[in-house]
Amino acid sequence: MGFIFSKLWTPANYDDPDPATGLTPRQRDTVQNTWKIVRSNIKENGLTFFVKFFQKYPEYQKLFPFADVPLEKLRDDKKVLAHAMAVMYALNSIVDSLGDVDCLVQILVRIGSGHKPRSIQPIHFENLASFLVSFLIEALGKSVMDDSAVEAWRTAFKAANGIIINALQNA
């Protein structure tokens, strides 16, 4: 009976991918709904994400003004917190704009071109995206970040990173 109701109440195009992002409306909703959970404690989640990110990629910390801050002191550093918050709010903008491709593209181009002067390479964005998906699985659990949620996030990052990296390389 649930199947019948879900078919009656689900829009006909709910599983048709957007030509620009590759995301279906279902995947877009999944990304937005899982991100709402992260957003509810954005400061702590952002800080935890970056501390773990720099544990996995310590060489990336050298690209930031807090390059010399010992790993065990990153949580207390205001520059780390400021950067974590900037990234989390950029992710808010990206997630919130998944349904408005023109706006989304402008946000992503700005991110890509803005990182050119910082010697950021495509691999940095690719590793950030991959690590964020792993972080979401750990932070939200596999009941929230099930296979379909993981696939939705990977699809979103594939599209986003394509635009970011293009802007980075052409800036």
Image: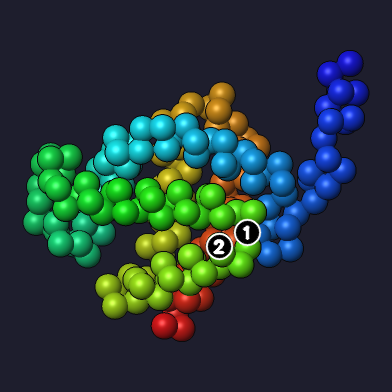
**Residue 34 position (above or below residue 21):** above
In this rendering, position of residue 30 left or right of residue 170: right
Percent x, y for residue 138?
A: 42, 31
Percent x, y for residue 45?
A: 34, 37
Q: Secondary structure at mark 1?
A: loop
Give, as a three-letter code, the residue at label 2: Leu
**Residue 77 position (above or below residue 4):** below
Quarter of the C terminus within the rendering: bottom left
Please name the residue shown 90% across and 23% down the image: 4
Q: Nearer the viewer, residue 92 or 19?
A: 92
Spatial separation of the CA atoms under disc 2 and disc 1: 6 Å
Q: Which residue is mark 1?
A: 100
Per the rendering, the mark at residue 104 is 2
Give, as a three-letter code, the residue at label 1: Asp
Quarter of the N terminus within the rendering: top right
Q: Given contact means CB atoms under 8 Å apart, are the residues at marks 2 and 1 in contact?
A: yes
Percent x, y for residue 139?
A: 41, 31
State the image quarter where residue 119 is shown: bottom left
Q: Secondary structure at mark 2?
A: helix
